Image (cartoon, rainbow, N blue to C red):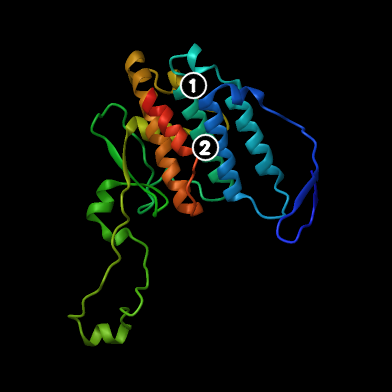
Amino acid sequence: LLLAKGRSLDKIIQAETTESYPGLSQDLSKLAASQYLAELVLCHALSEQPQEELYELLNEHLRRLEQLPKITANPSGLSLVLAHLSHGVFHLLALAGIAPQVQLCCITQHSLRPDLTDPNWRVGFSVEAGGTISLVSNQSNRNHLPNQTIPNQAQSLSETIDNPDTDIILPPPPRVNHKLNALELTLLQQLAAAELPQLSTLLKDQLAGSKAAESVDSLWVKLERILRDYAQYHFGRSIRSAALVDSLSSVN
């Protein structure tokens, strides 16, 4: 790519295609997912700075999307697209240094181990806190929150000692945007891996095969939207291609 400086915008005067993905344009779901990833890359990219790792990561996930079977030939086609889209989003967030914390509680830093045998097991997900939160600690143990200075309300140590009745204002606990069950957190925890796991192996002996397949198909819709909310919050920009992804999910 050869650019020439303009007064307000640079001009492309020469370009060479090194890789192309014609298969993406032949499937609307793949096209929407690839545009989605491209938008996130633009959020992350630095002006006039080479970012080879970001470039290679985008190409890798575009390649994986293109190689997926067509939806018309696979009943779970859209679920596969959403799974790979979620995987790509997580990797882009990790490269930007803002991947959500999904292995530990953001408040207590205790490890989270989903119990797939308990249908009532739940954990919270807070966009502003940066990931998963134990619902028990969030509701009943404010002392685990990090110390914060509250503008215009902080009291000096001497003032507090002289006036023991002084109210100490604690920051509110992080808002829980979503609640995840054990299967949802299990899937979310796998997204940091280089490859998507074989779910049949991951869920072996924990859920019946048909039940697991049905659950996974619907869960990827939820997990993609959680990651979308998280990315939009931390990048400070909306993802316009997500509207098309939503329309495809509603149709299916």
Q: CA distance from mark 1 to mark 2?
A: 14 Å
Locate residue 214, reporting x and y percent.
35, 19
Against 170, residue 157 (above or below) is: below
- x, y percentage for residue 126? 36, 49
Q: Position of residue 35 (x, y in %)?
A: 56, 36
At label 1, which amino acid type do we have? Gln
Front-most of 251 and 184?
251
Q: Residue at x 64, y 32 (%)?
A: 60
| Rendered view: 47 above or below 13 | below
Residue farthest toward the front in the current orientation of the protein:
7
Per the rendering, the mark at residue 192 is: 2
Q: Nearer the viewer, residue 120 or 211?
A: 211
Front position in the image: 6 or 29: 6
Kind of residue at disc 2: Ala
Q: Which residue is mark 1?
A: 198
Percent of width and height locating residue 23: 63, 22
Determine the image quadrant of residue 219.
top left
Total labels drawn: 2
Marks 1 and 2 close (CB-CB < 8 Å): no
Between 159 and 247, the residue placed more toward the observer is 247
Mark nearer the N terminus (1 vs 2): 2
| Image quadrant where one finds the C terminus | top left
Q: Secondary structure at mark 1?
A: loop
Q: Quadrant of the N terminus?
A: top right
The residue depicted at 35 percent of the width and 53 percent of the height is 108
Which residue is outermost to the top?
73
SS class, disc 2: loop
